[in-house]
Amino acid sequence: MKLKEYRIPMPLSLDEYHLGQQWTEIELLKETLQTCATHVTMFENITEQERMKIINDKVPLPLRDKISFLTSMTHRQYRIKDQKSKIFNFVFFKPKADLVLDEYSWDSWPYTLTIVENLENSVRIIVQSYCQTNSPLAINQNCQVYFPLNTHQMRISKDYEIINVSERLDEKRDYRIDEDPTRNISLKKPNLLPLELNSKWYENQSSICIYKLVELMMLNDSNEEKSFLSKATNKIIWSSIIKTQRILYHRFHQKMLCDIDQWIDKTMANVREEERLLRKFLLQHQQTLLEHSNK
């Protein structure tokens, strides 16, 4: 088991963040669909029995108190074609076919739970998130009060990393000027942007903070002594996951801020309608692919 905590301060209210988060997720999913290399399947009409089975099979016992079969849940499957995964593409561990990732998400706002797994390589990533209004000093308090941790987990998760949206992405190929909060303005929230480059703006004003706890589980792990190769492989997987997650969280929250004029006047009903239309498009696309495969 590996654990990593991220803390992401944002100059928004809780309600604004919830709206912007939902809108940004839809926009990024649209962006994903524009790449021919990724096929997305959204599973509809999940029965109560199926929900309970997923919870029992996927969710660790200590986390089941946070959700139930009544909690809003989504299941998406990403089939990544014609490209090698940054996580799995290394010695002896190269995918021979499409990389298939199943994503299960539960929304019990302000707590959310996401599980991403690749069963072929026995990898499961569990991401817990909690959004909280913070005083300027609370961001640096080294304590995990929002997630159920046992003694062993608390011992190995003493460190955390702050993702500062006023800093630019390390990876130049991931940098986009239209998603840089230090180089964009907002007409509808003129006091929000731009942020000062590399500033610790969150230490001088109240904000919200998104706490994220990322956990890696190797499903084929046992208590038996692991080989050197197994330990080395797990370390490489974890390093790759951490790097990828940091980039994803950084870009997601920068994009949310820079696009604020596009979503700040919307309602959750507007966002749900966009989500419904996107789901309808995906289902039609899936049906077309199925018909072509049967010919």
Image (tube, helix red, strand yellow):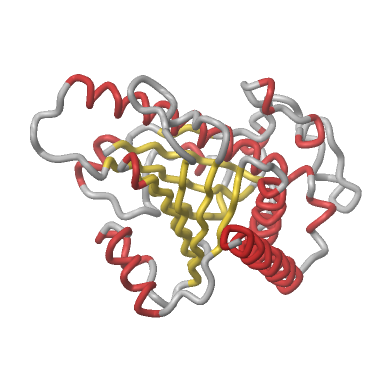
Q: Quadrant of residue 221?
A: top left
Q: How many marks?
A: 0
Residue 68 percent coordinates (x, y): 37, 73
Considering depth in this image, is 139 or 34 the residue closer to the camera?
Answer: 34
Q: For this view, does 74 lie left or right of residue 208? A: left
Q: For this view, does 281 lie left or right of residue 186? A: left
Q: Residue at x 37, y 30 (%)?
A: 238
Looking at the image, residue 9 lies above or below residue 16? above
Residue 285 percent coordinates (x, y): 67, 61
Residue 30 percent coordinates (x, y): 71, 52
Q: Residue at x 65, y 37 (%)?
A: 251
Considering depth in this image, is 65 or 142 the residue closer to the camera?
Answer: 65
Q: Quadrant of the N terminus?
A: top left
Looking at the image, residue 164 lies above or below residue 286? above
Q: Residue at x 43, y 49 (%)?
A: 116
Q: Quadrant of the C terminus?
A: bottom right
Residue sitting at the far front: 295
Residue 281 percent coordinates (x, y): 71, 65
Q: Quadrant of residue 88?
A: top left
Q: Residue at x 60, y 44 (%)?
A: 38
Residue sitting at the far right: 187
Looking at the image, residue 145 lies above or below residue 70? above
